[in-house]
Amino acid sequence: MYFKQEEVKLPAPGGPPVQLIADPSQGLACIALAECTYCAKHVETLQRHSRQKHGSSGLMEIQYKPCLIQRIFTSIANLYFEIRDSVLPGIRPDLKAMLKASFLLAFDVPLVVLADTE
């Protein structure tokens, strides 16, 4: 259990959207370092991140890419993470159907188990 939202580990970048939280929206992902997973909604926020974490001083030094983002918390300190670009904003995949198609078809088990003896 986490007591502060800063301690929560965000999903890995490029994954599917998380259901039952805020819908995906357009945003920006930092690409200054390969291990940096910081995402923001506005260029100004990304500029502040670049100054504080990467030592960038000017707007031209900010390295980012446009992407789809999602946030877990809706408080003042939003935590965004990058999601797969193949997902349209506002459309949520049916998780139950995906799991059923992926896992239940892999098991070829009869629904009724026959008795070993009469």
Image: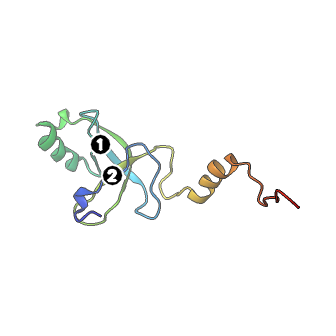
Q: Amino acid at mark 1?
A: Thr
> Tags 1 and 2 in contact by the CB under 8 Å rule?
yes
| Quarter of the figure with residue 33 | top left
- Distance of label 1 from label 2 (alpha carbons): 9 Å
Residue 34 placement, left or right of 93:
left
Q: Amino acid at mark 2?
A: Leu
Number of marks present in the image shown? 2
Query: Which of the two marks, 1 or 2, is nearer to us in this view?
Result: 2
- Extreme front residue here? 117
Q: Quadrant of the C terminus?
A: bottom right
Depth check: give the residue in front, 33 or 61.
33
Circle 2 Cα neighbour tier, 10 Å, few/some/many (<14 / 14–19 / ≥20)? some
Q: Which circle marks residue 10 in the picture? A: 2
Check disc 1: other Cα within 10 Å, few if <14, some if 14-19, many if 20+.
some
Residue corresponding to mark 1: 37
Q: Label 2's element?
A: loop
**Helix, strand or loop for disc 1:** loop
Where, by quadrant of the figure, is residue 84 drawn? top left
Left or right for 81, reference 95? left
Q: Quadrant of residue 62?
A: top left
Give x and y (percent) for residue 113.
Answer: 78, 59
Q: x and y percent of residue 114 in the render? A: 82, 58
Q: Earlier in the sequence, mark 1 or mark 2?
A: 2
Residue at x 50% of width, y 51% of height: 88
Front residue of 90/10: it is: 10
Name the residue at 40% across, 54% down: 25
The residue located at (67%, 46%) in the rendering is 106
Q: Looking at the picture, does residue 36 appear above or below residue 95?
A: above
Label of residue 104 in the image: none
